[in-house]
Image: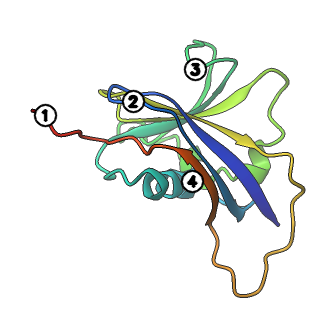
Protein backbone atom coordinates (compact mmCIF):
# COMPACT_ATOMS: atom_id res chain seq x y z
CA UNK A 1 0.00 0.00 0.00
CA UNK A 2 1.06 3.57 -0.64
CA UNK A 3 0.94 6.06 2.21
CA UNK A 4 1.40 9.79 2.21
CA UNK A 5 3.66 11.34 4.82
CA UNK A 6 4.08 14.95 5.85
CA UNK A 7 7.71 15.85 6.56
CA UNK A 8 8.18 19.18 8.30
CA UNK A 9 11.41 20.94 9.24
CA UNK A 10 11.26 21.93 12.91
CA UNK A 11 14.76 23.21 13.58
CA UNK A 12 18.39 23.19 12.54
CA UNK A 13 21.47 25.33 13.03
CA UNK A 14 20.94 26.99 9.65
CA UNK A 15 17.14 26.73 9.55
CA UNK A 16 15.82 30.18 8.75
CA UNK A 17 12.55 29.51 6.92
CA UNK A 18 9.73 27.01 7.10
CA UNK A 19 9.81 23.97 4.84
CA UNK A 20 7.51 20.96 4.52
CA UNK A 21 6.85 18.24 1.97
CA UNK A 22 4.21 15.60 1.36
CA UNK A 23 5.61 12.39 -0.06
CA UNK A 24 3.86 9.24 -1.29
CA UNK A 25 5.76 6.05 -0.49
CA UNK A 26 5.35 2.37 0.15
CA UNK A 27 4.18 1.52 3.67
CA UNK A 28 6.95 -1.12 3.76
CA UNK A 29 9.63 1.60 3.53
CA UNK A 30 12.30 1.14 6.20
CA UNK A 31 13.59 3.97 8.37
CA UNK A 32 16.92 3.77 6.56
CA UNK A 33 15.13 4.24 3.23
CA UNK A 34 13.13 7.14 4.70
CA UNK A 35 16.43 8.78 5.66
CA UNK A 36 17.52 8.73 2.01
CA UNK A 37 14.11 9.97 0.84
CA UNK A 38 14.32 12.97 3.18
CA UNK A 39 17.92 13.63 2.14
CA UNK A 40 16.85 13.81 -1.51
CA UNK A 41 13.83 15.98 -0.69
CA UNK A 42 15.94 18.65 1.06
CA UNK A 43 19.00 18.13 -1.20
CA UNK A 44 21.37 17.48 1.72
CA UNK A 45 24.60 15.51 1.43
CA UNK A 46 24.44 12.20 3.26
CA UNK A 47 27.58 12.82 5.28
CA UNK A 48 26.52 12.75 8.93
CA UNK A 49 25.04 10.40 11.50
CA UNK A 50 21.29 10.38 11.89
CA UNK A 51 18.55 8.83 13.97
CA UNK A 52 14.80 8.54 14.21
CA UNK A 53 13.00 8.71 17.50
CA UNK A 54 9.48 8.51 18.85
CA UNK A 55 8.70 10.99 21.62
CA UNK A 56 6.10 13.47 22.82
CA UNK A 57 8.14 16.46 21.62
CA UNK A 58 11.44 16.99 19.83
CA UNK A 59 13.08 17.76 23.19
CA UNK A 60 11.61 14.90 25.23
CA UNK A 61 14.14 12.71 26.98
CA UNK A 62 11.73 9.78 27.05
CA UNK A 63 12.44 8.44 23.55
CA UNK A 64 12.38 5.25 21.58
CA UNK A 65 15.44 5.69 19.40
CA UNK A 66 16.53 4.13 16.11
CA UNK A 67 20.03 5.19 15.10
CA UNK A 68 22.97 4.43 12.82
CA UNK A 69 25.65 4.75 15.47
CA UNK A 70 28.46 2.45 14.28
CA UNK A 71 29.34 1.70 17.91
CA UNK A 72 25.90 0.20 18.52
CA UNK A 73 26.13 -2.97 16.43
CA UNK A 74 23.28 -4.64 18.32
CA UNK A 75 20.74 -2.08 17.09
CA UNK A 76 19.82 -2.94 13.52
CA UNK A 77 16.24 -1.69 13.93
CA UNK A 78 16.99 1.31 11.68
CA UNK A 79 17.47 -1.10 8.79
CA UNK A 80 14.59 -3.45 9.57
CA UNK A 81 11.83 -1.25 11.01
CA UNK A 82 9.17 -0.33 8.47
CA UNK A 83 6.73 2.54 8.57
CA UNK A 84 3.78 0.15 8.70
CA UNK A 85 5.26 -1.43 11.84
CA UNK A 86 5.53 1.98 13.56
CA UNK A 87 2.15 3.49 12.74
CA UNK A 88 -0.14 4.18 14.37
CA UNK A 89 2.18 5.70 16.94
CA UNK A 90 1.31 5.48 20.64
CA UNK A 91 -1.11 8.18 21.77
CA UNK A 92 0.59 11.54 22.24
CA UNK A 93 3.80 10.42 20.49
CA UNK A 94 5.36 11.68 17.27
CA UNK A 95 8.06 10.43 14.92
CA UNK A 96 11.13 12.65 14.50
CA UNK A 97 14.17 12.48 12.24
CA UNK A 98 17.44 13.97 13.50
CA UNK A 99 20.22 14.53 11.00
CA UNK A 100 23.73 15.80 11.82
CA UNK A 101 24.30 15.89 15.56
CA UNK A 102 26.31 19.12 15.18
CA UNK A 103 23.84 21.23 13.19
CA UNK A 104 20.93 19.31 14.73
CA UNK A 105 18.41 19.26 11.87
CA UNK A 106 15.09 17.96 13.22
CA UNK A 107 12.12 16.99 11.08
CA UNK A 108 8.73 15.76 12.24
CA UNK A 109 7.18 12.94 10.23
CA UNK A 110 3.48 12.21 10.31
CA UNK A 111 0.95 10.32 8.25
CA UNK A 112 -1.54 12.45 6.41
CA UNK A 113 -5.25 11.84 6.66
CA UNK A 114 -5.26 10.51 3.11
CA UNK A 115 -6.29 6.87 2.91
CA UNK A 116 -3.65 4.36 1.80
CA UNK A 117 -3.99 3.38 -1.84
CA UNK A 118 -2.64 0.83 -4.27
CA UNK A 119 0.43 1.78 -6.26
CA UNK A 120 -0.53 3.35 -9.55
CA UNK A 121 0.97 1.79 -12.67
CA UNK A 122 3.75 3.86 -14.18
CA UNK A 123 4.26 5.98 -11.05
CA UNK A 124 7.67 5.75 -9.36
CA UNK A 125 7.59 5.77 -5.56
CA UNK A 126 8.62 7.57 -3.46
CA UNK A 127 6.97 10.54 -5.12
CA UNK A 128 6.96 14.18 -4.02
CA UNK A 129 3.32 15.29 -3.97
CA UNK A 130 3.63 18.77 -2.51
CA UNK A 131 6.28 21.07 -1.10
CA UNK A 132 5.89 24.37 0.74
CA UNK A 133 8.31 26.92 2.06
CA UNK A 134 11.96 27.14 1.19
CA UNK A 135 14.39 24.23 1.30
CA UNK A 136 17.02 24.70 3.97
CA UNK A 137 20.65 25.02 2.98
CA UNK A 138 22.78 22.40 4.66
CA UNK A 139 25.93 24.51 4.45
CA UNK A 140 25.08 28.11 3.54
CA UNK A 141 27.78 30.29 2.01
CA UNK A 142 29.49 32.68 4.39
CA UNK A 143 30.19 36.28 3.44
Q: CA distance from mark 4 to mark 3?
A: 18 Å
Q: Which residue is mark 1?
A: 142
Residue pictured at 59% horizontal, 38% vertical: 8
Residue pictured at 87% horizontal, 60% vertical: 116
Q: Mark 4 against mark 1, which lies toward the viewer?
A: 1
Residue most extreme to the left: 143
Mark 1 crowdedness (10 Å alpha carbons): few <14, some 14-19, many ≥20 = few
Q: Mark 4 against mark 2, which lies toward the viewer?
A: 2
Mark 2 crowdedness (10 Å alpha carbons): few <14, some 14-19, many ≥20 = some
Q: Nearer the viewer, residue 124 or 48?
A: 124
Q: CA distance from mark 4 to mark 2?
A: 21 Å
Q: Mark 3 against mark 1, which lies toward the viewer?
A: 1
First of labels 4, 2 by sequence position: 2
- Quadrant (top left, top right, bottom left, bottom right) of the N terminus: bottom right
First of labels 3, 1 by sequence position: 3
| Residue 83 relative to residue 136: left or right | right
Where is residue 104? Give x, y as percent.
38, 27
Q: How many marks?
A: 4
Q: Which residue is mark 2?
A: 15
Q: Nearer the viewer, residue 143 or 4?
A: 143
- Quadrant (top left, top right, bottom left, bottom right) of the C terminus: top left
Q: Which residue is mark 4?
A: 34
Q: CA distance from mark 3 to mark 2?
A: 15 Å
Residue pictured at 63% horizontal, 78% vertical: 124
Where is residue 83? Give x, y as percent.
71, 50
Residue 74 position (above or below residue 91): below
Residue pictured at 79% horizontal, 76% vertical: 119
Residues at discs 4 and 1 in contact (Cβ within 8 Å): no
| Residue 66 relative to residue 86: left or right | left
Q: Quadrant of residue 49?
A: top left
First of labels 1, 2 by sequence position: 2
First of labels 3, 2 by sequence position: 2
Amino acid sequence: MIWTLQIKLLSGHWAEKDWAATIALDAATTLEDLHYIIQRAVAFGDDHLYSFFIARTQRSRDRVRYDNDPDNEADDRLYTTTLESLFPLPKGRKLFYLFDYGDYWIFQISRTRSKPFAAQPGVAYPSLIDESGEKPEQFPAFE
